[in-house]
Image (spheres, coloured by chain):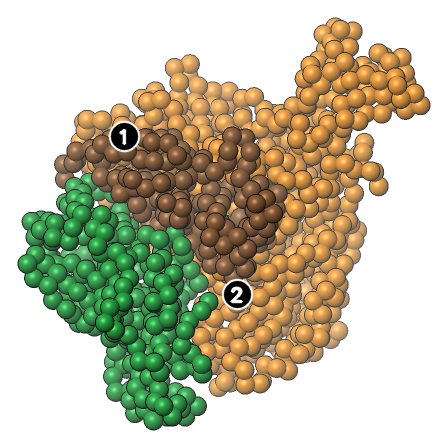
Chain colours: A green, B orange, C brown
Amino acid sequence: MRLPHFDLRQPSTVEEALSLMEEFRGSALALAGGTDLIPLMRYRLEVPSTLVSLQKVDCLKGISLQDGRVFIGAMTPLADLVSSSIISDNFPALLQAARAVGAPPILNLATVGGNICQNSRCLYYNQSRTWRLERPACFKAGGNVCHAVPKGNKCFSVYSGDLAPALVALDAVAAVEKRGRSRSVSIEELFSGNGLHPIALGKEELVTGVAILLPEKSSNSSYMKMRARPSIDYPLVSAAACATRGGNGKIEKIRLVLGAVGPSPVVVGDVGRFFEGKTLDEVDFDALSEIIGKGARMVDNLTFPGSYRKAMLSVIAEKAVRAALRPGAGKEKQ
Amino acid sequence: MDDLSYVGRSIPRKDGPIKATGRAKYTVDVTLPGMLVGKVLRSPHPHARILSIDTSKATRLPGVKAVVTAADSLKIKHGFVDTPRYPADQYPLAVDRVRHVGEDIAGVAAIDEDTAEEALSLIEVEYEPLAAVFDPEEAMRPDAPEIHPSHPKVNEPYRNIGGKTATSWGDVEKAFAESYLVREDKFYCQMRAHGYMEPQATLAHFDYSGKLNVWTSSMGVFLKRAKLAKTLGLPYGSVRVLKTYVGGAFGGKIDLFHHEYIASLLSMKCHLPVKIVYSREEVFKAARPAQPLIVQIKTGVAKDGTILGQEIHAINDSGAYHGSGVVVIFLAWGFAMAPYRVPSLKYEGYSVYTNNLVRAPQRGHGAPKMRFAAESQFDMIAEELGIDPVEFRLRNVRKPGDILPNGDSVKNFGLRECIERVAERTDFKNRHEAAKRERETGSKVKRGIGIGTTAYFGGSLIYPNSSSALVRLNDDGSVSLLTGALDIGQGCETVLCQIVAEELGVPVEEVQIYAADTETTPVDIGSWISGLTYVTGNAVKKAAEQAMKKLLAAAARELGADVNDLVARNKEIFVSHCPDKTISYAGAVAASIARDRGDSIIGEGHFRTMKDEPFHPSLASTKGRWTENYSSYAQVAEVEVDTETGVVKIAKVTTAHDCGFPVNPALVEGQIDGQVSMGQGHILTEEIRVENGCVINPSFLEYKIPCSLDMVETDYIDVITEQYKRGHHYNTKEVGEGYVSGTVVSVANAVFNATGVRVRKTPIHPHDMLAALDRLRTPKEEKKSGRS
Amino acid sequence: MNKPAKRLISLKINGMEYEMAVRPNRTLLEVLREDLMLTGTKEGCDDGSCGSCTVLLDGSPVRSCLLLAVEAENREVTTIEGLAEDEKLHPIQQAFVDHGAIQCGYCSPGMILTAKALLDENPEPSEQDILHAISGNLCRCTGYNKIVTAIKAAGRNGKEGD
């Protein structure tokens, strides 16, 4: 399968890139590592007339530590994330999420910005043009049916990125820029909640980087991914947890985020009562499982049925919480 | 035993370096000057009448060199089987009706990919959709939409019956009446993909001499030639199919594939080379997947576990045409009766048309499905009788020399030894008992062990039925082997060269091989039906022996010695009692040419199995002999089941195998490892998902073949039952297909051992596993067994 | 849309400079196979899942089907054709041959290059390191067992050879 034709722009500065995004607003897409976008283009799910490649914008690459804050450029390859001691020392969840994305040939191309801004997925959407022509177009492809839920009136595609749930758990913030204006958005708010366009970015906007506050000494994080095959696979469900303990070893604070649930990573609300002031042994995971994924509508549009994936949410969440709280946890080594 | 220098050794494969360096040319890599890009237009409907096809716009598009539809063809049908009972039933280009999504409508050849794609979009086809049916049991109902009329010789009031195999012996009803325990169970196997890494591809060039030259990713060039010649209306001699390296096949590249026909027809129209390479999506939806099978099996046993009788109903969903459906229902019978004694058996297999894809054989062709059913039930019976699964099998296993109901002898059948040795190596009985006890403990991860076995045929009679080989001594004493065999990755070129090296006393790396070209190499049975090492191997052996005989005769005359006193080693011939009397092979060749009226030294060998059988066995009645050599093996799997997620992992598979005589043990190990992995995919993760006849997971992302992190530890036990002897035809047995079965069965049985969950459907989806575990916790007995 | 103009680019492949004109939509894989006839790099899927097309980019394995040829400018590309020196196999290639790690051979170029990148970084990898490194390269023939054996052996041999 060949790629459609497009014009390629290769700016070398952020300003140039932003100008191009403005100039070709709506008809241009930003190209980062290409591991998400290139297959979508091959399937004609994206047919931009211009690609603005960020590959030559060197200032978007790199991981740095400044004033208690870690900055990760949007064009930093995931392989650099995996080999960075700043990341492994401070953000085990992010390290584990990056590693879970795929094998080295993917990690070397895929970027942090690209992984965050990847499109949501569905078994009935991520198909070639020929395949899709065999049936009416679905909501996400511009039509008005859903093949996964025949009577559904909206798109149930699933956001399947690995980094975003971890970044949400770590309270990370994205730098979003357009020409002449930049804003900071929490990763959580970067998501629209709408399967049609899961990333809440203007057409001329780019995510240029991510900032994460250094964690408190007593805190730790983890990311767990469940998938049908241990590599070359998107998550069936995933969970990220970030936990802080008090001086007495008891849990002070916890943030739990679920991935591959719907169009956005989902922060499990009101979990304090299950954890705060308790040791790991005292946590009632059965009670916790009652509220996890409650209200989430998970349908049969990935490898395994929605009901199974939903049932697995509490299993994966417990694993993530336990890993974040396991005694002596802190630095992540393989 | 002879002192063997090359045969029986783990010699690295001859094509290793060319493959390791990326220099091996696969079909996708072959190019010719002026080559065009070919593409195929396919039906989006599972069942429809074609009202009209208008290719005029596509034909007028600049850059388009040829467009073909059925109107350009001879409308000659082809089929995997083409016999009076089962005549060919499929057009290479749809004539007036399509019966599955992806059926070929038209082909275009253009100067580049873009133009070819655009041309496809300009072809206008008008369809009248027809009612379709996708489930084989629904398709059999009298009110189902008719895809083809039922076979005229099938009397039941079923619709869409493409074929039927029926056979019986003994008195099954009496056997059941006398049984202590009778069980009846039903098992389902999914549709799977072969997952060869090189997609389907063809390059065809009809040159101005009137010859069609074809490079195609196949499993044997002679079968392709026959089918292309027939459908294109060309004499065999005008069709040349040439060797390329093959990027995997596993059964999925036998028979005529329509891109081969379409590329050829396009090239015949424009006299330019045309290459068609399928996208991976096209491989999933337009090439042929493997056979699914439903097996209903009723078994009666005596109190001690002796099998008294079996009744088996198999239903195959053959898809829109026969494909290999009418064969798999025949083979399934064979895999039911071969490994164990079944004194009374009634077997019925139906192959049913549906509006699904047409199927090809896949490694094992029915064996994994039949053995899965039979041996899952063995363990269920053993459990009910309180007998160990190993004991149960040993009580019923066939003995060497047993004569099967069709007249075959299992000869030096090693299954008993395989079972005993694999059980011993894995401490099976103790661990099986221990796992049962531990099932009730609180651990979330359950461990279990299970056994599975198979017997498999090799080299049976099917076109082209035999192999021939030529061994040529060159003037410098070097040796060339000419064979029609096609190496698809299993390493047959290496094995055949080992045999030549052994017979001629020439270093194996110096044996030159010229393989798989219908114009310059002799006929070959093909890299399928698991007969190459046996059939082609013996042809090569005979050819080498004949060449050696001529060489020694020339040397004897030259040295003035008796032929029986000569010893040949390392391209030198000397007189055994007088070692300084010597002549080189080059000298002997020159002597032969000088003295024998210019005779150069060429040996010729031919071989087929079952010399006394006129024809292959009857697909309808199973009458007639099936094979001369039954391989056998027993495999033990160790599994872990996570009861929280339902995920099953295979920790280790131990294989005791009787493949006769391993000509190259390392290659045998490679076959076993690959089949364990393929069996792992079968039982755990792989499934082509189809909705309304359309594949919804046509990619390697969504069709989950195992990756490296799934790797299963393997261990092997050689059970050698045959020997390679100089001067005799040698027996060796299948090694490339059967192990999938043992893996599938042993894992299913190990899962039961670990959890108490009986697997009745493959693959074991984690959600099904969880549901089954839930049902166990809230028991609701639904026993189908009855004790008399 | 209309075809955009070709770009004049210079690619550095296996130490050689190639000047060529390519359209932006062509992948490195297509250019290697079709323009430079470096057919050792294989295509096996449509979506970047199989790993057959793996090449080294500045020494690191990448999927050449996911990379635009234009974007490979000024980077060092190594394909399987660049590994053996004359007729002598690279130690990893030799290990693949010796240990039965090759059957049909279609995944071998990508697998061997991925292994090379691993061993360059870590000459004595553990089994888990190896399994993880090659987890993006599908092989249907071998079950991976002999590939792992070969990579382990090549790692040791490479060290002895130093």
Q: Residue at x 43, y 90 (%)?
A: A281
Horizontal and vertical percent position of residue C121: 46, 52
Residue B199's image quarter? top left
- In the rendered image, residues at marks 2 and 1 fall on the same chain: no
| Location of the N terminus of chain B (image quadrant) | top right
- How far apart in space, not on screen, are marks 2 and 1 (Cα)? 58 Å
**C93 left or right of B123 in image:** right
Q: In the rendering, which numbered label is found on residue B302? A: none
Chain at tag 1 = C
Decide which of C7, B744 is in the foreground and name it: C7
Horizontal and vertical percent position of residue B366: 56, 53
Q: Residue beneath label 1, please?
A: C20
Q: Is residue B68 visible?
A: no
Q: Residue beneath label 2, please?
A: B187
The kind of secondary structure element at disc 1 is: strand
Q: How crowded is the residue under tag 2: few (<14 C-alpha within 10 Å), some, or many (20+)?
A: many
Decide which of C59, B73 is in the foreground and name it: C59
Horizontal and vertical percent position of residue C159: 57, 49
Amino acid at dot 2: Phe
The kind of secondary structure element at disc 2 is: strand
Q: Residue at x 42, y 60 (%)?
A: A231
Q: How crowded is the residue under tag 1: few (<14 C-alpha within 10 Å), some, or many (20+)?
A: some
**B322 left or right of B344 in image:** left
The residue positioned farthest toward the front in the image shown: A67
Q: Is residue B459 above or below residue A322?
A: above
Q: Is residue B62 above or below residue B759?
A: above
Q: Residue at x 73, y 36 (%)?
A: B6
Amino acid at dot 1: Met
> Of circles 2 and 1, which is in front?
1
Q: Residue at x 89, y 12 (%)?
A: B560
**B721 left or right of B168 in image:** right
